[in-house]
Amino acid sequence: MAGSDLRTTIGTLEIAPCVFNASGPLSTRDEELWALAESDAGAVVLKSATLEPRAGNPEPRLWRDSLRGTSLNSNGLCNLGCEGHARQVERLRAEFGKPVIASIAGLSAQDYPAMAERLGRVASAIEVNLSCPNIPGKPQMAFDLEAARSVLKAVRRSTRCDLWVKLPPYQDRAMVEAMAQLLLDVGVQAAVCINSPSGLEIDFETEQTRIHPNGGMGGAGGRDILRIARWNIRQFFLALAGKVDVVGVGGVYSGLDLYGHLLCGAGAVEVGTSYLEEGPKIFGRLKRELHEVLAERGVPGIAAKIGALRVAPVEA
Ligand code: RRO
């Protein structure tokens, strides 16, 4: 069982095992990051940084239901600021052998290249977050192709570090193709699918929203988003045709969920809400369960299974 090969390559990075945390949950404070680095996670991804530190949106801003395996957040980019993140990345890389991915989310277009230049000097890769759903008055850049093109080109010019681009869930094939073409034109290393779909949760006892910011609306995570993530991973895997890697995120609670993202085309998988629930020991569990899934199928490693999903044949 322990023999199957869970190593993967995303851009220029070798990552083992192919599962690690999604940016956001438990990825800001030193204790959280050091626990991730010490866990079985294949890499460490930091919370998205802005140029300056931010306190984020007013509470309550995070709701979760562990029985249903679901969450809704409007954290509002609470983070330690670019310089604080750069120092954490440097220390993590000096202490541990695993890749450390810095995430950036500018409040304006000019912030992105400045942060990429700074963090690109220390990080293993930069995840460019074009899809934060929770900043009042700020549209998601990934839904404005021209704005996204100009930001990604400026970021590409500012650093030689690998670039991963965190995308929102799309619901339309034409939009996927246009974004995939942009990623190919700019020359990034990975598409990360998906950030949280917009959602709303109701407390029926009080007939109030579960969270406060943005009229109670935020980004959904957990089991509900598994199929939306699969659709996006598959679409980007097909549209990028092996020239840019795909990292899958969304709804993974088990080794089989993880395996499903690999079949759809993810070369690696990030976990958010389930990691928030279970803490860093989830990576050991998912690793064990993925070994079991592969052993049951007699598969020696994940490599041959990435994107190997087959379409059901027409019934005779
Ligand atoms: O901080 C947030 O509110 C947040 C971010 Br930056 C993001 O990318 N996705 C999300 O669900 N929440």
Image (cartoon, grey):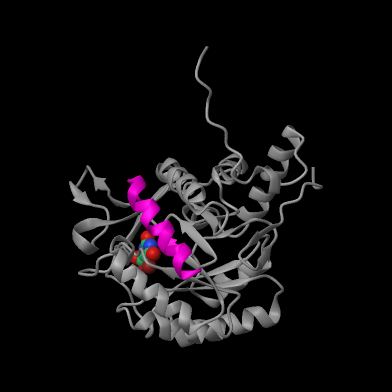
**Residue 308 placement (x, y as % from top left):** 61, 40
Q: Nearer the viewer, residue 136 or 73?
A: 136
The percent coordinates of residue 86 (x first, y second) are 53, 84
Query: Which residue occupies 54% across, 56% down?
Result: 247
Q: Is residue 271 left or right of residue 301?
A: left
Image quadrant of ligand 1 equals bottom left
Q: Is residue 25 visible?
A: no
Residue 296: horizontal and vertical position, in percent? Answer: 73, 33
Which residue sits at x=37%, y=85%?
52
In front of the other: 286 or 228: 228
Residue 310 vertical placement versus 176 (above, below)? above
Tell me the quarter of the image containing the N terminus.
top right
Q: Residue at x 62, y 66 (%)?
A: 43
Q: Which portion, as a residue range, is magenta?
A: 166-187
* Residue 146 position in % (x across, y down): 29, 68
Q: Quadrant of residue 219?
A: bottom left
Is 172 included in the stretch rendered in magenta? yes
Looking at the image, residue 285 lies above or below residue 179: above
> Outermost residue, right direction?
3
Q: Main secondary structure of the magenta part?
A: helix
* Quarter of the rendering containing residue 196: bottom left
Residue situated in front as seen by the camera: 116 or 93: 116
Q: With 109 as the anchor, is 98 left or right in this view?
A: right
Name the side, left or right, on which 13 lies relative to 265: right
